[in-house]
């Protein structure tokens, strides 16, 4: 059965992101001038105005910054998934990505509180597209880690 | 300080008009706008030919609008459907009059969202920069979901509760019951609120604004011209806006810094403080917005918006009765416009059962990363 959920429109600006994801890495464009990471793919920096980025690999670790759980079906491909969670994860490097939290027992909001440590997992959904999702960090809660 | 420092003149609202609200399948957005403008012109005692400037919002077909109304505006603009364009539309109208370009401007809004099946979320949704790339694959979409996330952060930081959201929903519904035009009038209990289905958890259907058809129009002119018109003028004493969308759809501070700047500018222009304000009209697309907005505009301390609301401040009889028409949650989703009309009518003192006694100054608050505020007053400054 073909994949029914929305797929990203991959263009020349975003291709490195999706190629990296396919290879199991989280990479983002980083401003050549001020060093801020972008979570958009246009070449202009919305912090300093510089035009020009290079790609850098990130740790893939972060914390849940915001969360919600969809009960309404907005995309036909998600009809079997509702209710499903969406989170905004703040990466160690300071930028934030929208994602799903996986590896939870029921997927309810209380299992994925704001502040919880998570790490990237890579889910190939089509031959071209690998989505970057996040799971509770294996070591989460261990003091001294 | 007057609206611009080198002029003594003021701006007045001299006519307001609204259609019915609800499902109006015999009208498109353009005809709803025409209906509203005709009401506003009648209210002002003007003919459409008296109107020199036409500032249109949301209704797409300015050409049909001008053809059918047989108007010949010397200023004509049309902006797209986002509620955030209210501020810019009003700024254009105000500045066009102050500059002397035109004397009288109609600001007209038409929305056939219900009949046209407007959806907020899903394929084609404009909310969220680059959403198609990095949101949709995860099922993320809609302004409601962003507000759900923002509320979750507010709750985590400050202990804000869904019962406090319920108070907003119930308060505005109680006000709507006093407004014959309101779409939703049935009283709400906390049980009703809790029983409403989740749309995007933790937000329930009763945390979301309505989607309905309707139109709103306001006619503005110079204070000088307003003196001998049919309605007693309501002065627009201050207007300020700030767009800081680069901070993202979900700003770290719930838009606080943005709103603080708008707040200080609007009060300075109006020469009126929060203590002078008798009622508030708050852009209530979702219940959490009301809490963030009260904090951003300094009506309560940061993080205290939930408690502030829960203490009954926004109810008729409270210190700052808000959204006395029922707001977007219960009256109609006119993207701020009917709240502005309600502000004018409160200052006129013509609202009967839902009139705030001796309302002299009413402030319109629109929060978020594109924030606007307008202060309407009985007296010019």
Image: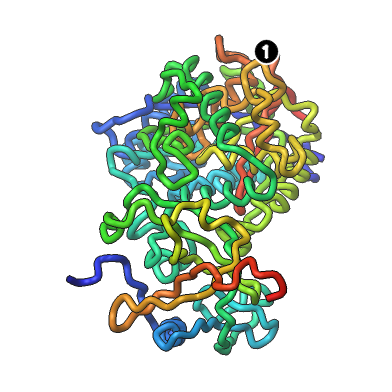
The structure residue drawn at horizontal position 31% and vertical position 75%, both measured from the top left corner, is A125
Which residue is located at x 32 percent, y 38 percent? B114
Residue B141: quadrant of the picture: bottom left
Q: Can you say whether A128 is above or below B44 in the image? A: below
Question: Hey, which residue is sitting farthest top in the picture?
Answer: B352
Q: Which residue is mark 1?
A: B357
Front position in the image: B159 or B277? B159
Q: Is residue B356 above or below residue B97?
A: above
- B304 sits to left or right of B155: right
Dot 1 lies on which element?
A: loop
Q: Nearer the viewer, residue A90 or B360?
A: A90
Residue B177 spot, x, y in % from top left: 47, 16
> Considering only vertical position in the picture, is A89 above or below B264?
below
User: Can residue B219 be seen by looking at this rendering?
Assistant: no
Q: Quadrant of the C terminus of chain B?
A: top right
Horizontal and vertical percent position of residue A131:
40, 75
Quadrant of the image occupied by residue B185: top left
Q: Which chain is indicated by disc 1?
A: B
Crowd tier of the residue under label 1, counting other residues whose Cα lies within 10 Å: few below 14, some 14–19, many 20 or above: some
Picture quarter with the N terminus of chain B: top right
Compared with B350, A13 (above or below) is below
Asked if one can make out residue B366 in the rendered structure from this viewpoint, the answer is yes
Q: Residue at x 43, y 23 (%)?
A: B182
What residue is shown at x 48% (from left), y 37% (from top)?
B207
């Amino acid at each position: 059965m073909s994949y029914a959920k929305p797929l990203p429109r991959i263009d020349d600006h975003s291709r490195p992101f999706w190629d990296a994801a396919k290879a199991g890495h989280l990479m983002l464009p980083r401003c050549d001038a001020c060093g801020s990471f972008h979570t958009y793919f246009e070449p202009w920096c919305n912090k300093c105005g510089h035009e020009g980025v290079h790609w850098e690999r990130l740790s893939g670790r972060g914390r849940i910054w915001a969360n919600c759980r969809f009960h309404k079906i907005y995309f036909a491909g998600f009809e079997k998934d509702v209710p499903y969670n969406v989170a905004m994860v703040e990466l160690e490097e300071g930028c934030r990505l929208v994602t799903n939290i996986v590896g939870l027992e029921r997927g309810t909001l209380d299992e994925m509180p704001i502040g919880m440590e998570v790490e990237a997992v890579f889910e190939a959904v089509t031959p071209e597209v690998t989505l970057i999702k996040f799971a509770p960090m294996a070591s989460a809660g261990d003091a001294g880690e | 300080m007057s609206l611009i420092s080198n002029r003594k003149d003021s701006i007045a609202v001299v006519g307001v008009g609204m259609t019915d609200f609800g499902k109006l399948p015999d009208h498109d957005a353009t005809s709803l706008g025409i209906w509203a403008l005709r009401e506003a012109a009648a209210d002002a005692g003007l003919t459409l030919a008296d109107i020199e400037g036409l500032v249109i919002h949301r209704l797409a077909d300015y050409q049909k609008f001008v053809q059918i109304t047989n108007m010949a505006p010397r200023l004509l603009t049309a902006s797209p459907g986002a509620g955030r364009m209210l501020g810019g539309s009003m700024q254009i109208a105000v500045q066009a009059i102050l500059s002397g370009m035109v004397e009288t401007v109609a600001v007209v809004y038409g929305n056939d969202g219900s009949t046209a099946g407007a959806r907020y979320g899903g394929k084609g949704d404009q909310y969220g920069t680059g959403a198609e790339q990095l949101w949709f694959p995860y099922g993320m979409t809609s302004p409601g979901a962003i507000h759900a996330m923002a509320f979750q952060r507010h709750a985590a930081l400050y202990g804000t509760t869904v019962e406090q959201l319920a108070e907003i929903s119930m308060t505005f519904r109680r006000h709507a019951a006093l407004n014959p035009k309101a779409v939703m009038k049935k009283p709400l209990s906390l049980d009703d609120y809790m029983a409403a289905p989740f749309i995007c958890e933790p937000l329930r259907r009763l945390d979301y604004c309505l989607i309905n058809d309707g139109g709103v129009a306001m006619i503005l002119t110079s204070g000088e011209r307003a003196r001998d018109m049919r309605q007693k003028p309501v002065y627009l004493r201050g207007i300020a806006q700030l767009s800081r969308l680069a901070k993202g759809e979900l700003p770290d501070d719930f838009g606080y810094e943005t709103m603080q700047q708008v707040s200080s500018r609007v009060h300075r222009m109006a020469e009126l403080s929060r203590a002078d304000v008798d009622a508030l009209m708050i852009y209530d697309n979702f219940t959490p917005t009301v809490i963030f907005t009260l904090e951003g505009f300094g009506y309560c301390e940061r993080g205290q918006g939930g408690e502030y609301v829960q203490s009954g401040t926004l109810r008729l009889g409270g210190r700052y009765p808000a959204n006395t028409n029922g707001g977007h949650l219960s009256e109609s989703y006119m993207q701020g416009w009917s709240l502005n009309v309600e502000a004018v009518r409160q200052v006129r003192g013509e609202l009967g059962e839902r009139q705030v006694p001796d309302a002299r100054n009413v402030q319109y608050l629109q929060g978020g990363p594109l924030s606007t505020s307008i202060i309407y007053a009985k007296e010019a400054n």
